[in-house]
Amino acid sequence: MRINIIGGGIVGLCSAVALAEAGHRVTIIDDDASRHAASWGNAGHIATEQVAPLASPASLRTAFRRRFAAGGPLDLPLSGVRHWLGFLPRFLAAARPSAFRSGSAALGSLLYPALPAWRRMVGLAGKPMLLRADGHYVLWESAATAQAGAAAWHAAEIGTASLHAMEAAEMARLASLVGVPIAYAVRFNGSGQIADLGALADALEEAFRARGGTIERSPARLAIDDGRARVEGHDADIIVVAAGVRSRALMEQAGHVAPLIAERGYHIRAAAGEWPADLPPLVFEDRAMIVTRFADTVQAASFVEYHSPDAPPDPRKWDRLEQHVRELGLPLAPPFTRWMGARPTLPDYLPAIGRSRRVGNLVYAFGHQHLGLTLAAVTGELVRTLIEQETPMVDLTPFDLARFGE
């Protein structure tokens, strides 16, 4: 079967590898040759523990004190009000307790096979060493936040992950790295990390091409004719929309409601220096910041900023990340490289994975919010089952775009 995939980010690329491995003739159409998309600037964390969608009662209770103006990670800038104002009512509806419970069950069903799917995917790429399944740490700087935070995690649904208090040797190691006292820390097991995002992109693209796949570095012009989708200049039997934040316009062109927003995140990177190469990601929960060692760099990432994907970055967020690094006494020194990327987020914080009921040859996979990397491999396998009309490993009903109206 001839298949065109619009979007060469991590979801599109994993889908392409899975389809090419199954013997299909696949072309990725993507103009992001420089890899500016959120797929290649994230924290590298395989977050199997994040079963609770961010559209939740807890998010509503804590939103005011977590706002950027009060030192927190959440920002709804007035300059972006036309982008997020229509998003909020759907978010509030999804955060109702009953909707949240349903969303957690749905998200958990995707997270359960996420890490095994990644093991299969890096195996297909011939680079198993790129996946590290040695967990991560969560740290608190004050006794009060530690007590509340640890209790919340112990009470939370965390799927296939587990957590335990840090052993003395582990605490001593972290204390030698962090320049402020650590009140408490826990270690998660069953989560993972990609060791190098650039190397992962290279490996997946190489594996895709080795299986006969083609990557076309150009914008994709979608057309809908007589109930069928096509990409101008590229003949195909099936079109897959996996274009991240750009998917909204494409799906609306096909007659679907896709209330996608750009949820922008920021990171800074510096040379790894003295940062241990084998240290799992560190989450400084009081600061909503995750610090990850990649191949030869260390990255600090944070923020939830609802805006247009094309709006200029807010330098204050990079400044605050650098301030956090200084205040924590982390062994990271300037110059820092600065990055901002747009996570594709739907109001209920569930992805859209399914087959169009309006356009017979259109499949979609986007809207993975903070979990794009985590869920990319399993999503790629699900896209293959949709195209081959097999029974998927999980019930895809909660991820159908029809939930937002036809």
Image: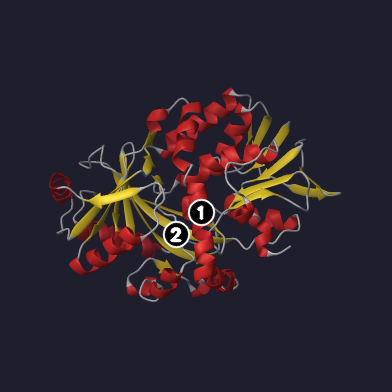
Q: How many labels sit on residues?
A: 2
Q: Check the picture and name the quadrant holding the N terminus.
A: top right
**Residue 242 percent coordinates (x, y):** 62, 46
Report which quarter residue 46 is drawn in. top left
Give me the residue at 47% from left, 42% from top: 114
Lower position in the chain sequence, tag 2 or tag 1: 2
Give me the residue at 41% from left, 68% from top: 74
**Residue 153 percent coordinates (x, y):** 32, 59
299 is higher (above) or lower (below) than 256? above
Q: CA distance from mark 2 to mark 1?
A: 7 Å
Q: Is residue 49 visible?
A: yes
- For the residue pair 9 and 119, the one nearer the viewer reads as 119
Tags 2 and 1 touching, CB below 8 Å: yes
Give me the residue at 36% from left, 47% from top: 161
What's under tag 2, amino acid-wise? Ala
- For the residue pair 79 and 142, the one nearer the viewer reads as 142
Give the SS element for disc 1.
helix
| Classed neighbour count for the residue bearing mark 2: other residues with Cα under 10 Å, few (<14), some (14–19), many (≥20) | many
Q: Check the picture and name the quadrant holding the C terminus.
A: bottom right
Give the SS element for disc 2.
loop
Q: In the rendered structure, find residue 192 and report the number of the disc placed on it.
A: none
271 is higher (above) or lower (below) than 49? above
Q: Is residue 39 visible?
A: no
Say which residue label 1 marks: 107
In the image: residue 194, left or right of residue 13: left
What's under tag 1, amino acid-wise? Leu
Q: In the rendered structure, find residue 52 and report the number of the disc placed on it.
A: 2
